[in-house]
Image (tube, rainbow, N blue to C red):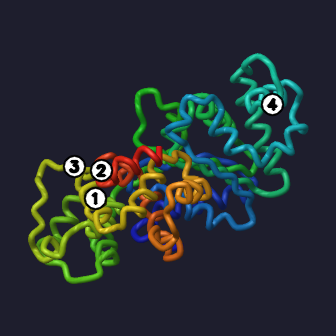
């Protein structure tokens, strides 16, 4: 995988992966605004982790109130090694994951158990733990992961988390960070050109590059929602409209061109919180949406928009879905 304009960021990830292959450990929080390319960098790390065991999780906003939800998502594939932990740690993690009954576990024991579980899993080959959307981790999971990440030394474990800008109560504060900024002007222009399928007025091109501040998602998605007149020189979005609003307007225009059943399917993707494609298609069957209307067999256009982030799932972008379809999808 080659990421345009991300040489230094990829080099930092390469160094971390090289360190765990040499028997060391480390953690890295990849921080940046929505759409700046954090998930792409995580995918790069996964692709470069040949010979390593990779465990993945993602924060889910609707699960933030569920204690240890994200931790269970990350560690579920390691539970066969639970018996290798000392009894207090084993019991704490078993109760946290609902494997046995008991009083709420001591969070210190849970953190130590996670550290021991990761070390045990890396005993035969290096382990890479990748967590996306870490700003939406439940508090208990974030505490346990941060606790373990701060104590990694020579276990051949890498913990890589992607998160937005730190808030006042960010539990990941203090871990090594990799700041991801917008693309430099030449790279932004090259990425914008890759998203175009027709001519664009040079003044329009200059304005988009200037106003999108190198945000890759904006550079790729905004032109797709512009009319031919705008591309030819009629680009006149209000100065005060924020980036999310501009992208929402573009997504809304694209939605207007879809059949009603395709729009219902996109709404089903918006209200389904965990990105489960199988569940999405089950919802499509309940809605009577066929693969012809949805684009299921034509490259997954709906899935592409679902992965683009929260903007296309907003009420404004999906406002054109018939009210009955909204109620049935919910």
34 to 15, vertically: above or below: above
Identify the secondary structure beneath mark 2: loop
Q: Position of residue 174 (x, y in %)?
A: 52, 35
Which of discs 1 and 3 lies nearer the camera? The answer is: 1
**CB atoms at circles 1 and 3 under 8 Å apart?**
no
Identify the secondary structure beneath mark 1: helix
Give the Cα separation between the discs numbered 3 and 2: 19 Å
Q: Nearer the viewer, residue 220 or 146?
A: 220
**CB atoms at circles 1 and 2 under 8 Å apart?**
yes
The quarter of the displayed image where residue 145 is located: top right
Looking at the image, which residue is at 55% across and 55% down? 286
| Mark 1 vs 4, N-terminal side | 4
Give the Cα separation between the discs numbered 2 and 4: 44 Å
Residue on which the image places disc 1: 252
Identify the secondary structure beneath mark 3: loop
255 to 152, vertically: above or below: below
Q: Position of residue 298 (x, y in %)?
A: 49, 77
Q: Position of residue 44 (x, y in %)?
A: 55, 64
Q: Residues within 10 Å of mark 3 (few under 14, many from 20)?
A: few
Looking at the image, which residue is at 54% across and 49% down? 132
| Mark 1 vs 2, N-terminal side | 1
The quarter of the rendered structure image containing the N terminus is bottom right
Residue on which the image places disc 2: 319
Which of discs 1 and 2 lies nearer the camera? The answer is: 2
Residue on which the image places disc 3: 242
């Amino acid at each position: 995988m080659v990421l345009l304009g991300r040489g230094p960021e990829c080099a930092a990830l390469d160094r971390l992966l090289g360190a765990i292959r040499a028997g060391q450990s480390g953690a890295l929080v990849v921080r940046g605004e929505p759409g700046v390319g954090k998930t792409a960098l995580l995918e790069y790390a996964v692709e470069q982790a040949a010979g390593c065991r990779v465990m993945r999780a993602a924060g889910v906003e609707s699960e933030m109130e569920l204690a240890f939800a994200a931790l269970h998502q990350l560690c579920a594939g390691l539970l066969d090694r639970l018996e290798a932990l000392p009894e207090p740690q084993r019991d704490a993690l078993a109760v946290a994951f609902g494997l046995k009954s008991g009083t709420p576990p001591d969070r210190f024991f849970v953190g130590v158990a996670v550290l021991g579980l990761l070390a045990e899993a890396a005993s035969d080959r290096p382990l890479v733990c990748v967590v996306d959307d870490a700003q939406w981790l439940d508090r208990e999971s974030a505490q346990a992961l941060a606790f373990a990440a701060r104590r990694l030394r020579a276990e051949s474990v890498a913990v890589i988390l992607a998160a937005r800008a730190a808030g006042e109560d960010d539990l990941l504060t203090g871990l090594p960070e990799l700041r991801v900024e917008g693309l430099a002007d030449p790279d932004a222009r090259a990425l914008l050109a890759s998203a175009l399928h027709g001519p664009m007025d040079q003044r329009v091109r200059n304005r988009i590059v200037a106003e999108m501040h190198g945000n890759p998602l904006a550079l790729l998605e905004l032109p797709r929602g512009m009319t031919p007149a705008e591309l030819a020189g009629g680009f006149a979005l209000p100065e005060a409209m924020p980036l999310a609003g501009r992208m929402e307007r573009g997504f809304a225009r694209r939605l207007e061109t879809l059949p009603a059943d395709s729009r219902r399917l996109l709404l089903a993707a918006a209200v389904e919180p965990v990105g489960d494609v199988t569940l999405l298609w089950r919802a499509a069957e309940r809605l009577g949406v066929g693969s012809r209307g949805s684009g299921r067999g034509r490259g997954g256009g709906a899935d592409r928009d679902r992965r683009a982030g929260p903007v296309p799932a907003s009420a404004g972008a999906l406002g054109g879905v018939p009210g009955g379809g909204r109620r049935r999808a919910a």
